[in-house]
Amino acid sequence: MTHLELDSVTKVFGDPDASGVVAVDDLNIDVPDGDFLVLLGPSGCGKTTTLRMIGGLEDPTEGEIRFDGTVVNDVKARNRDVAMVFQDFALYPHMTVEQNLGFGLRREDNGMTDSEIKDRVREVAEMLEIEELLGNKPSQLSGGQKQRVALGRAIIREPRIFLFDEPLANLDAKLRKTMRTEIDELQSEVGITSAYVTHNQEEAMTIADRIAVLNHGELQQLGSPDEVFNEPANLFVAQFVGSPDMNLFEARLGETADAYQVDSEGLSFEIPKEYVEREITTEDVLVGFRPQDLYQARNRDSSGPAFDTDVRIVEPVGTEAIVHGTAAIGDVTAKVGDFHGLATDDEIALTIAPEHVYLFDAATEELLKGRLVSERAADQATDSIEA
C-alpha cells in the first residue's frame, strides 16, 4: 500500500509565463494507504491530467507528487510501479487472455520462472472468474470480459497504486453497475491505493472512500461520499452531485431568537437554529431542496415548508416517480412514492423537513447550511433542549 500526496500541484500546457492553458491549478490531495480516491468533475476539469501526472505520463509544472513521502516528479512512469486501466481496454489482439495477463510479468526483470508466472496468471484469472477464457483471444470476448482482462493485467503486477481512467465508459448501463461493484470489491480485497477518474457521480458515490470534486482545474471539495452529498462545499458541488438536480430558489434570510426565517416568492418558513451548524450573517441566500427529500404532505407531517405544485410530467422509476411541476416558487422536481394515479395537471402538496433544506450564500455560493441526516439532527435537537 502507498500513501499518495499531491502538494500544490499545477499543470500548465504551453508557456506558463504567457498564454498557457492551466489544466490543474494548485491541487492538494492526500490519499491514505489503501484508500479509493475518485476524481470527479465535468469534461475538461483536469481529472485525467491529474491521473496522468500521478502515473508519470505528464510532468507537473509546479508542486510535488509524493509516494510514501518520497517525491516522484522526476521518476519515469515505468519506474513508479503504478498500473493503469484505460477507457480503451488496450488488449493485445494477437495474444490469448493468458498471454495478455502474463505479458507484464514476462517483460519485467522480476526473477519469476515460467511456472510461477503461469500460477500467478491462473490465480488472478480465478479471482476475476475468467479462468475458462484463458485460451481465448480478445476478439472472442464480450465487453465485460475484456474489462476483466484489463483489470487482471493491472492486478497481476501487484503495483503500488492503481489508476483507472473512466474504465467503464464503453460498457452498457447494466454492465457498468456490475463492473463498478466488482472493482470496488476487488480494490477492497487487494488493498492497493487507487485513483479513479469519472464524470459519473453515481459511480463516484458508490465506490469511493474519498471524492475529489474538480472544476476548471481547481479542487472544489475533498471528502467522503456522505460529506460531498450532505455538506457540499459550494453550489457547484451541490448541483454536480445528486440526481435529479437540486431545486434552487432565491430568498431573503431573517433571524429570530430561535430560528432563521426564509422568505421567497410564494414561500415563507423557519429553520430552527439547532439545525444550523454555523452563524449566518448574510441576507441574500439560495435555498436548495433535493428531489429525494421532498414528499407529499398528505403522507407525512412536517414543520418545514409546504407548497402546492401543478404536475407537468410524471416519470415512473420503479417504486418511485420523478415528478416535474410548477409552484409559486418556480419549477420543482420531486422524487416521490405513492405516485399511482398522478397525472398531468393534477395538483399535489409537497413538503420537506427543515433539517434537509440547504442554504447557500447568494454572492459567494458557499454552503451556509447542509443537509443534516436524521440521527445528527435528532442529536442536535436533544442538545438544544438540554441546554
Image (cartoon, rainbow, N blue to C red):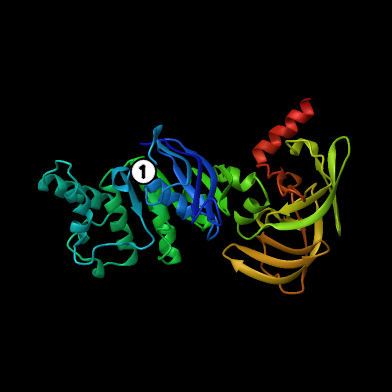
Viewer-proximal residue among 366 and 265? 366
Horizontally, is 360 left or right of 21 in the view?
right
Establish if 344 lies above or below 56: below
Viewer-proximal residue among 316 and 121? 121
Establish if 92 lies above or below 234: below
Establish if 315 lies above or below 227: below
Q: Amino acid at mark 1?
A: Ile
Residue at the farthest top position = 387
- The residue beneath circle 1 is 161
Residue 197: % across, % down: 46, 53
Viewer-proximal residue among 152 and 164? 164
User: Residue at (65%, 52%) from the top-left corner?
Assistant: 238
Label tally: 1
User: Residue at (54%, 51%) from the top-left corner?
Assistant: 17
Residue 25: % across, % down: 55, 48
Work out which quarter of the rendered image holds the C terminus and state it. top right
User: Residue at (65%, 44%) from the top-left corner?
Assistant: 231
Work out which quarter of the rendered image holds the N terminus and state it. top left
Which secondary structure, mark 1? strand
Residue 5: % across, % down: 45, 38
Viewer-proximal residue among 281 and 191? 281
Residue at the farthest bottom position = 344
Residue 255: % across, % down: 87, 40
Report which quarter residue 266 is drawn in: bottom right
**Mark 1 surroundings: few (<14), some (14-19) or many (≥20) residues within 10 A:** many
